[in-house]
Image (cartoon, rainbow, N blue to C red):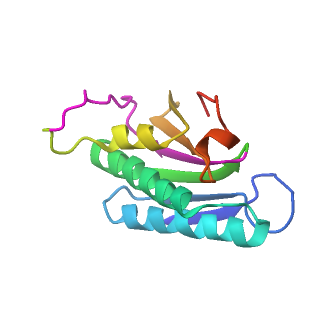
Amino acid sequence: MGQAVGDEGQKTGGGPLSASAAYGGDSSCIGDARHLATSFLADVQAVRGFPVSQRALGMTQLVVSELVTNAVKYAPGPVTLDLQISEGAVRVSVWDSDPVLPDGAATDPQRVGRHGLEIALAVSQAYEVRREPVGKCVTALIAPADDPGGIIAGRTAP
């Protein structure tokens, strides 16, 4: 696993505004990705004073877990995770090598599994999937405060 934390060109005081990691693509990286998200949000809150509620922390961990799990399960090869504070929200982006865009299954309470995309969509303020020259990138925005209608209300795409 490779991991980097940096400012991505944003100079507003000490501490990171972004964190990234590249993983080999096996299931052991899912916990590592959740840990990176937790550490990143703790650092941003402690160093920058960026407010992150317990709900937002939990939702970010959940979205990271679901998106990375999907990438590991359905795409061969490496996975990258990028976390950013962007426009007052937590931006979670997961890249994988498979160009096939995710297709959410119809709601079925009897279905076992394949709920990751549904979950990510349900807890995110905005969601986007785009093809890359190789593979695809899935991005979700999560409001960092307990009032999800206040910070990025009305946004439909990251």
Question: Considering depth in this image, is 51 or 21 the residue closer to the camera?
Answer: 51
Question: Considering depth in this image, is 124 or 14 the residue closer to the camera?
Answer: 124
Q: Is residue 153 magenta?
A: no
Residue pushed farthest left? 110
The answer to whether 34 appears left or right of 102 in the picture is right
Q: Which residues are magenta?
A: 88-109
The answer to whether 93 appears left or right of 106 in the picture is right
Q: Quadrant of the C terminus?
A: top right
Q: Is residue 104 magenta?
A: yes
Residue at the image point whose x is 50% and y is 37% from the top: 137
Q: Is residue 118 visible?
A: yes
Residue at the image point whose x is 48% and y is 54% from the top: 59
Residue 66 screen position, x and y as percent: 37, 50
Residue 103 screen position, x and y as percent: 32, 28
Residue 43 screen position, x and y as percent: 67, 70
The answer to whether 27 appears left or right of 44 in the picture is left
Residue at the image point whose x is 76% and y is 58% from the top: 7
Residue pushed farthest right? 12
Q: Is residue 96 visible?
A: no
Q: Is residue 23 above or below residue 137?
A: below
Residue 119 screen position, x and y as percent: 37, 43
